[in-house]
Image (cartoon, grey):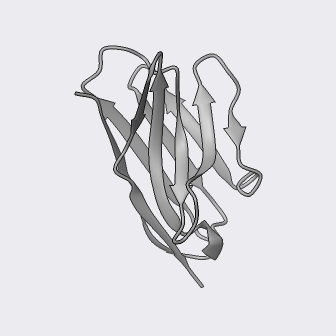
């Protein structure tokens, strides 16, 4: 069974940095795309960044210039480097992956930014 497991979340002060990781297991294929979504309290889940295989990255306007997505296709792992964090970045961050006809989600990792 495919599993996406996030790690790296935590509590950080505004202006600080965190690096999230998502490792996929139980697969024998490469995802069409991997990326990150987030959901803040009382808000809808929103796209943060995606990296399709062979395609260009896509970032939400709110994180451009601060967040960087990176993907190791061979290891089926995706990362999110978050710099210059703001209080409004506080959310549960979910790893997301897509293959032909299937979509997968991680369990989420909490990111809390304080100031």
Answer yes or no: is residue 33 visible.
yes
Q: Is residue 1 above or below residue 86?
A: above
Kindly indicate the quadrant of the structure image that contains residue 22. Answer: top left
At horizontal 53% and vertical 44% (from top left) the residue drawn is 36
Residue 50 at x, y percent in the picture: 61, 36
35 to the left or right of 28: right
91 to the left or right of 3: right
Q: Is residue 84 above or below residue 115?
A: above
Residue 4 at x, y percent in the picture: 34, 38
At horizontal 77% and vertical 52% (from top left) the residue drawn is 61
Residue 8 at x, y percent in the picture: 40, 56
Residue 113 at x, y percent in the picture: 54, 74
Task: Indicate the quadrant containing the N terminus: top left, top right, bottom left or bottom right.
Answer: top left
Answer yes or no: is residue 15 visible.
no
5 to the left or right of 93: left
Kindly indicate the quadrant of the structure image that contains residue 109. Answer: bottom left
At horizontal 59% and vertical 69% (from top left) the residue drawn is 16
């Amino acid at each position: 069974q495919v599993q996406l497991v996030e790690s790296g979340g935590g509590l950080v002060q505004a202006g600080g940095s965190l690096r999230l990781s998502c490792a996929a297991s139980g697969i024998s294929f490469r995802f069409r795309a991997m990326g990150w979504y987030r959901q803040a309290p009382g808000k809808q889940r929103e796209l943060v960044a995606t990296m399709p295989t062979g395609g260009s990255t896509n970032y939400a306007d709110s994180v451009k210039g601060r967040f960087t997505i990176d993907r190791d296709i061979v290891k089926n792992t995706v990362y999110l480097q978050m710099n210059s964090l703001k209080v409004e970045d506080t959310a549960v961050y979910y790893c997301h992956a897509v293959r032909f006809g299937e979509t997968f989600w991680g369990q989420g990792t909490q990111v809390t930014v304080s100031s």
